[in-house]
Image: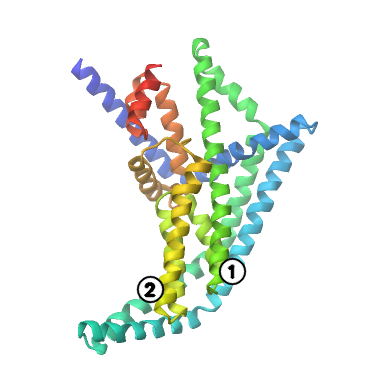
């Protein structure tokens, strides 16, 4: 009995490592397909609604694909335009950053007794390195714009095909399932599609509300590059835990660089912190809820592993992928312990598995 269980664990580990290797080496091919599959789950209700209104399958799929193209294209254009303005103003930002550091040196010198010369050498080396690295990354990002657009267009092609043949894909999967397991397989597919749709649509609504709150706060405090920081702050929150932290740090740093008043900086930091609390503890539970029932540890590991394997795309995609794996594990007898391990509420998962 012991060796049989050990053999089963080894098989699961080997299978998991094989999947990770396939994801790593097939990243260029799999990333656009995965984005397209998740976007198809997001807009498939709209596609079904259009078909129910009398539009054909091809026309409804094309309209939904064009909808994604227009929305993402408009946001991308606005983002790239703001990034270009930011890149052109980098010399001014460097000068403002140095002025801010000089003021900080004065305060540190009076508080700690460390000479300004020692501080100047320390800060100048690191600030020049950081700003040069930021400039290089912006230049690299803008120069690779052609390849980003190419991958986006490829994703749209996949999206159209997924929407067009979504029923056929489901039929093909059902053909490989035993007749007595048809109900279970259909339940797994429907639940996976529902979880991905709920997660992504909930994220879109949270990001929109967060962008509104950020834009109002940044406008009140007259923050430089507020449109760019609002877009970045809203979009980056699609990455759980790390995203909200990054979306709050950058505006505070930018406000510190362009503002001399300590009380204003403190007040602005408090406002950003309150907005993040509203997003994390009010908007997310109300809008997204507990649909993606994954433990925080599993989410963090998914972000880290996804970032190592697929980069930024993996940090976004691996959380809903892990939610799908949990659904499959919950409905598979030999994998139920993994479903319990990944779950956010072990007691509820145990009760569900017994049922």
169 with respect to 314 (left or right): right
Using the image as rendered, state which of residue 202 and residue 171 is in the foreground. Answer: 202
Using the image as rendered, state which of residue 5 and residue 259 is in the foreground. Answer: 259
Identify which residue is drawn at 40% across, 24% down.
330
Q: From the image, tell me which residue sits under label 2.
A: 130
CA separation in Å, label 1 and label 2: 20 Å
Q: From the image, tell me which residue sits under label 1.
A: 82
Q: Are marks 1 and 2 in contact (CB under 8 Å)?
A: no
Identify which residue is drawn at 21% across, 85% down.
114
Secondary-structure class at tag 2? helix
- Image quarter where the C terminus lies is top left
Residue lying furthest top:
180
Tell me, yes or no, if residue 144 can be seen here. Answer: no
Residue 5 on image: x %, y %: 24, 20
Secondary-structure class at tag 1? helix
135 with respect to 148 (left or right): left
Tell me, yes or no, if residue 309 can be seen here. Answer: yes
Q: Is residue 196 above or below residue 282?
A: above
Using the image as rendered, state which of residue 129 and residue 294 is in the foreground. Answer: 294
Q: Is residue 45 above or below residue 107?
A: above
- Image quarter where the N terminus lies is top left
Q: Is residue 13 above or below residue 109?
A: above
How many residues crowd around disc 1 within 10 Å: few (fewer than 14), some, or many (20 or more)? some
Identify which residue is drawn at 55% across, 45% down.
32
The numbered disc on residue 308 is: none
Marked residue nearer the N-terminal end (1 or 2): 1
60 with respect to 209 (left or right): right
Based on the displayed image, in which of its 4 quarters is residue 79 positioned? bottom right
Residue 190 on image: x %, y %: 55, 26
How many residues crowd around disc 2 within 10 Å: few (fewer than 14), some, or many (20 or more)? few
What is the count of numbered marks?
Answer: 2
């Amino acid at each position: 009995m012991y060796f049989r269980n050990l053999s089963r664990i080894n098989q699961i580990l080997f299978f998991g490592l094989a999947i990770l290797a396939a994801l790593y080496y097939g990243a260029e091919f799999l990333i656009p397909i995965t984005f397209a599959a998740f976007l198809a789950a997001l807009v498939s209700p709209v596609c079904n609604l259009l078909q129910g209104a009398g539009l054909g399958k091809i026309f409804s799929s094309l309209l939904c694909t064009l909808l994604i193209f227009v929305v993402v294209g408009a946001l991308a254009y606005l983002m790239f335009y703001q990034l270009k303005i930011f890149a052109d103003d980098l010399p001014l930002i460097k000068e403002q950053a140095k002025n801010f550091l000089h003021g900080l040196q004065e305060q540190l010198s009076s508080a700690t007794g460390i000479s300004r010369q020692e501080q100047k050498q320390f800060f100048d080396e690191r600030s020049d390195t950081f700003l040069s690295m930021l400039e290089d990354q912006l230049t690299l990002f803008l120069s690779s714009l052609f390849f980003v657009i190419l991958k986006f267009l490829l994703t749209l092609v996949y999206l159209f095909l997924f929407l067009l043949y979504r029923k056929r894909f489901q039929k093909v999967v059902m053909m490989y399932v035993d007749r007595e397991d048809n109900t279970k397989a259909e339940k797994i597919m429907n639940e996976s599609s529902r979880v991905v749709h709920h997660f992504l649509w909930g994220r879109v609504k949270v990001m929109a509300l967060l962008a509104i709150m950020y834009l109002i706060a940044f406008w009140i405090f007259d923050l430089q590059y507020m449109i760019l920081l609002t877009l970045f702050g809203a979009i980056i929150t699609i990455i759980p835990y790390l995203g909200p932290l990054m979306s709050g740090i950058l505006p505070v740093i930018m406000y510190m660089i362009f503002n001399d008043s300590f009380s204003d900086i403190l007040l602005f930091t408090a406002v950003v912190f309150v907005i993040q609390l509203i997003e994390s503890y009010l908007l997310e539970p109300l809008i997204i809820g507990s649909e993606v029932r994954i433990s925080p540890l599993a989410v963090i590991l998914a972000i880290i592993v996804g970032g190592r394997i697929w980069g930024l795309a993996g940090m976004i995609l691996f959380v809903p992928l892990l939610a799908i794996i949990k659904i499959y594990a919950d409905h598979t007898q030999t994998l139920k312990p993994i479903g319990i391990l990944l779950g956010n509420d072990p007691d509820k998962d145990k009760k569900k598995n017994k049922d």
